[in-house]
Image (cartoon, helix red, strand yellow):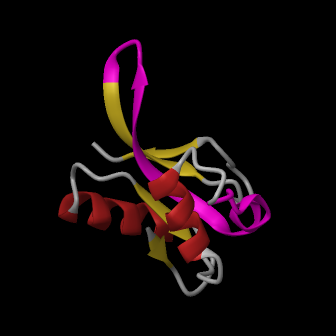
Amino acid sequence: MVVVKHRPSDPELITLARQLHRLYPSDSINVFDDDTKLKAYRDWTLNYPSKAYPYPEAWVNKHHVAMINKMFDAGGGRWQLRGGSAHPEQPESKIADLE
């Protein structure tokens, strides 16, 4: 997980994603623009499906800007930058291929 100080533009997100993917080529990474519920989100991811750690849905919907993830399709897997729930124009959609 990465927290940015301001909501980046798509070109800024692409630059950040490419840098992060070069440093951590096998890791999926979520990008947020706020850290107030980051611990709750991390606890949820580490303990899923335990009901003791609820998904902070409202916070994620407001602050999950993007994710770097290997997406699978008919041609195999491809690392992509995808808009998060809070991306203003491309929620849950591909922004750029990273490889």
Provide residue 53's location: percent of width, then percent of height.
62, 60
Query: Is the residue 97 above or below the residue 89 in the image?
Result: above
Write the start and end of the magenta stretch as one range. Answer: 53-76
Magenta stretch: includes residue 72? yes
Q: Residue at x 43, y 61 (%)?
A: 14
Magenta stretch: includes residue 65? yes
Res 36 visible = yes
Residue 90 in the figure: left or right of residue 43? right
Provide residue 12's location: percent of width, then percent of height.
48, 71
Residue 76 in the figure: left or right of residue 42? left
Give the quadrant of the N terminus. Answer: bottom left
Q: Residue at x 40, y 25 (%)?
A: 72
Provide residue 86's location: percent of width, then percent of height.
71, 61
**Nearer to me, 95 or 82:** 82
**Nearer to me, 69 or 48:** 48
**Nearer to me, 16 or 85:** 85
Give the quadrant of the C terminus. Answer: top left
Please, which residue is most extreme toward the bottom here? 5
Query: Is the residue 56 above or below the residue 95 in the image?
Result: below
Q: Residue at x 38, y 61 (%)?
A: 17
Res 8 visible = no
Please, which residue is most extreme toward the top here? 74
- Label count reads 0
